[in-house]
Amino acid sequence: PPAPATMAILSKGALSLTLAIATSAISSVAVSVDDLMPNVAQAQNRKEKDKPTTVLVDAHNNNNNNIAGQTSTDSLALQKHLRAGEGGMVEHVRRLQVQEDTETEATSTGGVNQRGHGRRLQGVSTQEIPYGIIMVQGDQIPPPPATNMMKSCIVDTGYDSNHPDLRSDLGSSGLNGFASIGLWYNDEIGNGTHVAGTVAAIDNAEGVVGVYGDPTRYSLFISKVSGFSEASISQSLIACRDAGAKVIAMSTGGFNFTGIENVLKDLYDNDILIFAGAGDSGDTASFYPASFKTVVSVAAVDQSENVANFSQRNDQVEISAPGVDIYSTLPANNYGFKSGTSMASAHVAGSAAKIWSSFTECTNNQIRNTLLRTASVSGQQSSWTSTQGWGVLQAKSAFDQLETYGCDYGGPTDPPQGQELSDLALGGRDQLGWLTHAPTPAPTINSADPTDVPTDSPTV
C-alpha cells in the first residue's frame, strides 16, 4: 500500500445547509486539533451541568480526508472557521447551535424529534430513546447479571468524560492519542463521544439512552486515534486487549495493512469480538479493517431500513444497523445528529456486549453467528446481500435464541483440532457457511450479488 495513510472517521453530519468543502490529502502525521479548533478545546473542559442544548453537527468525510464539524457557540448563528493544519490539511468547520427557545428544531411537541426518530420515555419528558436503539431491539435486551460486567473498547476520536449522559468514573481506563494527539478523555472532534452515547448513554431522565442504560452493568476503555497507520491502530487494538475488553468498536479505516490484520487475528484467537463500519464511500471497494475476516463489517440503514447511499457494498458486509441521522451525545454537554457506518457499528457492538454478558460461556464466534442468524429485513429472515449483509440486527431475538438453545445456536464451541477461533472467521457472505442444520431454520446463503440499489439517506 502507499506509504502515507489517511484515516476516515466514519460519520457524516446532517444539516439542511450546503457549504463548499476544501480538502487536500493528508498523511498520518498527527495534527493538533487543539490548534485547529481552540474554541472547541475550551468548551470541552467546561464542567457546568446546564440544561443540554440540541446541536446539529456536520462531520462529512470526503475521500478519506477527515473534515470534521464541531460545536459550541453562544448564539443561534452559523460560523465558518477555515484553518490550515499540518500536513496540508484544511478543515472547514460548520457550527449551528439551537438555543433553548428554538429546541423544536429537533424535537416536536409530541415528544419525538422532528425527523421521526425515537420516543420519549413514559413519564420522563426530557429523555429520548433514539430510533436506532428501538429498531435493533437494544432497549429490549434483558440486563446482564451485575457480576458479569463486560468491558467494551471504543477506538475513535476520544470521549467527553464531563458529559452528564456518560460515565465520568472511568478512572485511567483509556489510551491517549498516538503521537500526542490528545488525551483520551477529551474529544475535540465529537465522533467518539457520539458513538459512546449510542453504546452507553445513561438512563438518567435527560438526553438519550444508549444500549446500556445502567452504568453499573458495563465498563468502557477508550482508545484515542488519529491517523490510520499500522503503528497507531495496532497500538490501540493491543491496548484494548490488555485492558480486558471483550468487544471492540472501531470508527476508523484505510488501507489493508498486514500488521493490523495480524493483530486482529490474535485478538480473535483470544476470544475478542471486533466491529467496524463497512465504510462511507458508497461503492464496492474493500475498506479496512471492516473487510478483514476477523472483523464484523456493519452497513448503515435509515429509519425505514433502506440502505444508506454512503454505505459500502461488498462481499464482507455482514450485518446492518441504523446509521442515518442518529441522535446521541456530543462534547460540551450537547446532543446532535450524525450519519455514518460508525454509528451503525456502535449499535451492533453495544448490543453484542450486552447480550454476551448474559452468556459468557459462549465464544466470540458463537455470539457473532447468532447475531447474523437472527438478523432480518422488514421482520423477515433474509438471504445475504452485499448491501445489508444478513440483515438488520435484532438483538432481543438473538438473546432469545441463546436462552432457548444455548451457545450451540451460534456454531461449535471449539474449532476443529489444530485450528484457532480465527479459522472460523470467514467473514461477510461466507460467515454462515458452516451452517448445515440448526434448531430453527437458517438463512439461505445467496451466492449471487443483489441487484437492488441502495437508496439515498433522508434529506434533512
Image (cartoon, rainbow, N blue to C red):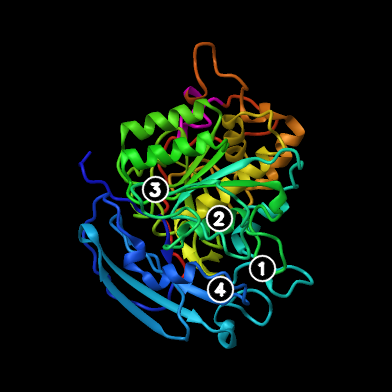
Q: Find residue 406 and report its image quarter.
A: top right
Q: Considering the numbered disc 3 on the image, is that residue within a helix, a strand or a loop? A: loop
Q: CA distance from mark 2 to mark 3?
A: 26 Å
Please provide percent x and percent y for residue 110.
Answer: 69, 79
* Residue on which disc 2 sits: 196
Point out the frontmost of discs 2 and 4: 2
* Residue on which disc 4 sits: 115
Q: Earlier in the sequence, mark 2 or mark 1?
A: 1
What is the three-letter code of the residue carrying label 4? Arg
Q: In the image, what residue occupies the spot 49% across and 16% down?
A: 419
* Residue on which disc 1 sits: 128
Q: CA distance from mark 2 to mark 1?
A: 16 Å
Q: CA distance from mark 3 to mark 1?
A: 31 Å
Q: Earlier in the sequence, mark 3 or mark 4?
A: 4
Point out the frontmost of discs 3 and 1: 1
Q: CA distance from mark 2 to mark 4?
A: 22 Å
Taking the view exactly as shown, the residue that stands out farthest to the bottom is 101
- Near-viewer residue (93 or 351): 93
Give the residues in magenta: 423-434
* Residue on which disc 3 sits: 313
